[in-house]
Amino acid sequence: MKFICIPTYNEEEHIGKIIKECKKFADKVIVCDDASIDYTVEFAKKEGAIVLQHEKNQGYGSAITTLFDYCRKENADVMVTIDGDGQHDPNQIPLLLDTLEKHNVDVVIGSRFLGDDDTATYRKAGIKIITSATNYSTNIKVSDSQSGFRAYSNKAINAIHPTETGMAVSTEILLKISNKDLSLAEVPITITYNGDTSTKNPVSHGTSVFATTLKYVSIRHPIIFYGIPGAILFITGLILGTSFLDGYLNAESPKIFYGQLLGSIVTILLGSLLIITSIMLFSMANLIRDKN
Ligand SMILES: Nc1nc2c(ncn2[C@@H]2O[C@H](COP(=O)(O)OP(=O)(O)OP(=O)(O)O)[C@@H](O)[C@H]2O)c(=O)[nH]1
Ligand SMILES: [Mg+2]
């Protein structure tokens, strides 16, 4: 069974048309609505979609988790996720499905950067930075880490258990694809940017996704992220401390340079803390990978 899943938050304008088009390609269309305050739920039901409702707004990632849970429970063969704001074209669903089936991969991502794309420069730059950081923290290489237009096989649905509540869930899922050694392909898709389709301010949206991505990078590469800065601070502290002692012990009339003393203590302590953090994360890395 093929399920098409749509996370929505106040999408009354687009949802009816999207469901109508999605029905051509699936056994079931499932909408996870996150406490919309418009007529999204009514319009989705009217078009015959199954509607899963959150009582309170919990975020895009929570809706994706609910949709994964539903598809797992129903033992879906394929799950496609598509945005409910009209930016993705449901008629491109077969592109993802064909790739999933013919190339026998576990996950297919629709990428806006593989074909013609008219993404605004600032948005493109933001997505590219997040994608580079994501690629660095995983074994896989994608061109559009933030695409919500994806297809998952039954194996992927059972292996991936998302936990991020916000937009960073797209990054988290890529990390899990990498950890579970699932196979992945990208296909070119188009995204339309007509009018104001964004639910969130692009700056706060981008910053929070970037911060979460950094969290994953730091867990994956603790020595580079914490260990090296820690070692630099520690050595700086030692140099400061030595020069302080030198000035204090060898001068004819010894004076205490409190700035130097304090600087040395603080940098040595901070450096040690970072080194310990990196060692602990490094030792825990396998454990964290298994749990994911
Ligand atoms: N369930 C749920 N869905 C959400 C939430 N926020 C956004 N969505 C849905 O997620 C999809 C993508 O949201 P957008 O805000 O357009 O995010 P985006 O497409 O990554 O960003 P833009 O490029 O700015 O459009 C749409 O279908 C939204 O309705 C939320 O809090 N809960
Ligand atoms: Mg959008």
Image (cartoon, grey):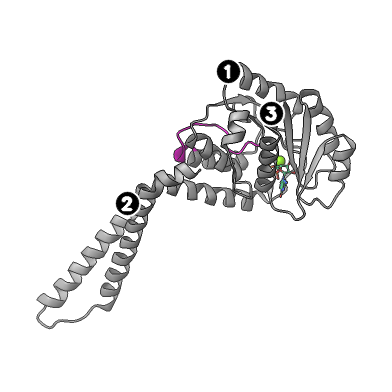
Rendering coords of residue 142 (x, y %): 53, 31
Count of numbered badges drawn on the protein: 3
In primary-sequence order, the first of circles 2 and 1 is 1
Q: What residue would you read off at disc 3?
A: 190
In primary-sequence order, the first of circles 1 and 3 is 1
Q: Residue at x 77, y 36 (%)?
A: 30
Establish if 211 lies above or below 69.
Answer: below
Q: Which is more foreground, mark 1 or mark 3? A: 1
Residue count near mark 1 (Cα–Cα under 10 Å), binned few <14, some 14–19, many ≥20:
few
Three-letter code for the amino acid on which mark 3 is drawn: Thr
Three-letter code for the amino acid on which mark 2 is drawn: Ile
SS at badge 3: loop
* C-alpha span from label 2 to label 1: 41 Å
Q: Residue at x 52, y 27 (%)?
A: 183
View quadrant of ligand 2 = top right
Residue count near mark 3 (Cα–Cα under 10 Å), binned few <14, some 14–19, many ≥20:
some
Q: What residue would you read off at disc 1?
A: 103
Rendering coords of residue 54 (x, y %): 75, 50
Looking at the image, residue 242 sits to the left or right of residue 82; the answer is left
Quadrant the N terminus occupies: top right
Rendering coords of residue 153 (x, y %): 62, 28
Three-letter code for the amino acid on which mark 1 is drawn: His
* C-alpha span from label 2 to label 3: 41 Å
Q: Please name whichever residue, 47 or 93, is drawn nearer the observer in this view of the structure.
A: 47
Q: Is residue 284 rendered magenta in the image?
A: no
* C-alpha span from label 1 to label 3: 21 Å
Q: What residue would you read off at disc 2?
A: 228
